Image (tube, helix red, strand yellow):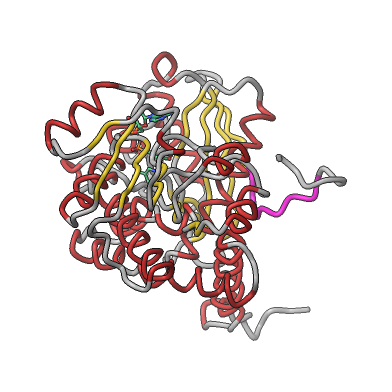
Amino acid sequence: MMFSDGDPTDIEHEQVVFCFDRESGLKAIISIYSTALGPALGGTRFHPYASLEEATADSLALAKAMAYKAACAGLDFGGGKAVILGDPRRDKSEQMLRAYGRFIASLGGRYVTACDVGTYPADMDVVARECVFVTGRSPAYGGSGDSGPLTAYGVLQGMHAAAQHRWGSPDLRGKRVAVSGLGKVGRPLVGHLVAEGAAVTGADVDPARVAAVRAAHSEVREASPDEIAALPADIYAPCALGGALDASTVATLQAEIVCGGANNQLAGPSVGQHLATKGVLYAPDYVVNAGGLIQVADEYQGWSPARARARCEEIFDTTLRVLRLADAEGVAPGVAADRLAERRMQRVGRLRSILLPGNVPHPSRRL
Ligand SMILES: NC(=O)c1ccc[n+]([C@@H]2O[C@H](COP(=O)([O-])OP(=O)(O)OC[C@H]3O[C@@H](n4cnc5c(N)ncnc54)[C@H](O)[C@@H]3O)[C@@H](O)[C@H]2O)c1
């Protein structure tokens, strides 16, 4: 939803900036949900939205999700997201991206951008010619490259934590794991699972993706994308698009744990409760898939693969904390994750109210 019910000006976000440059055709919206923990970090989505309202609604929802993801991951970043209206294959140009970079620069570091659907490291390199508040850049410019592998590594940590919580051991040996979506995240996740002795079944709408995984791991079994969620399995790992779980998928689900890399796995707010009622343990998507965000956050502060990997390993503890909090407070894990994020934004963000020398009013200031 773009706005909360009732008052259309009742927006939870700190700032929404509309950026127009007629000459280059740039129409962009930068939404900052919160800077309580630091600069609002979040990618730029380049998409042919049907209207300005649809684009605004998307940027607001995505910015909020980024704030919660960064807060749960323990990062010193707030949450934001930008959208550029247009067809990335047709409309993207140097002039447009540089105009966009100047608008980001105008925010003085309150918003830091990165890649998202429709934007790539090479685009960030162009944006960076106009402003420094950019990450997710090409390795040639000191960037960290594809974030799929680290995201997959983080999902694996979340899976270990969920296994620990459900079965009393993080060991995945012999567990049947159904992975839906064998792309930049799903494929390396399969590699980890095979290495740990799990029995993996994979599905993808693109047969080439399945073939690539089976060429690397012949023991991986193939399933149809429509049936994979209902297969007998211990863990279901959605790694394709959002909305993998709705009321009907939950009804046929056989897995005891859901833990995967996809964003927005639950088709609606009630699905988390459906899963809990059925006794399925859901490891919240934004908690376990934070590896990509951890990577670009680390890159922004001077890229260290070892440090980012170590931070990704903390996803094990965070996931366990979320699952225990859910039990303790009698709520679904998704609600517990939101509470954890909100508490950190509130408690750590509050520290900004302690006056520092730079903000002390000068004694000569006249009333
Ligand atoms: N790449 C990252 O760093 C990262 C980080 C966090 C979250 N995510 C999320 O993880 C998910 C996957 O991202 P990715 O980078 O691997 O994307 P990708 O495009 O590389 O892979 C997605 C795969 O899913 C397949 N697919 C599409 N629809 C499907 C369906 N109905 N059933 C089965 N397979 C289907 C596609 O063919 C593709 O192979 C997305 O939801 C993304 O938002 C990615």
Q: Residue at x 66, y 29 (%)?
A: 54
- Residue 293 at x, y percent in the picture: 38, 53
The answer to whether residue 141 is left or right of residue 254 is: left
Q: What is the quadrant of residue 256 in the picture?
A: bottom left
Q: Quarter holding the C terminus?
A: bottom right
Residues 40 and 263: in front is 263
List the single residue furthest toward the right. 6
Q: Give above or below for 84 relative to 60.
A: above
Q: Is residue 88 above or below residue 358?
A: above
User: Is 6 on the left or on the right of 189, as rendered?
Assistant: right
Measured as percent of width and height from the top left, residue 263 is found at: 47, 44
**Residue visible at 29% across and 39% down in the picture:** 201
Chain part drawn in magenta:
9-16
Give the side of residue 256 with respect to residue 250, left or right: left
Residue sitting farthest toward the top:
90
Residue extending farthest to the bottom is: 363
Which quadrant of the rendered structure holds the N terminus? top right
Residue 74 is a magenta residue: no
- 108 vs 183, nearest the viewer: 183
State whether residue 333 is above or below residue 189: below
Left of 23 or right of it: where is 209? left
Residue at the image position 74 percent from the left and 79 percent from the top: 366
Q: Main secondary structure of the magenta part?
A: loop
The image quadrant where one finds ligand 1 is: top left
**Total numbered labels:** 0
**Image x and y of residue 162, in percent:** 41, 64
Residue 11 among those drawn in magenta: yes
x, y (%) of residue 70?
Answer: 46, 60
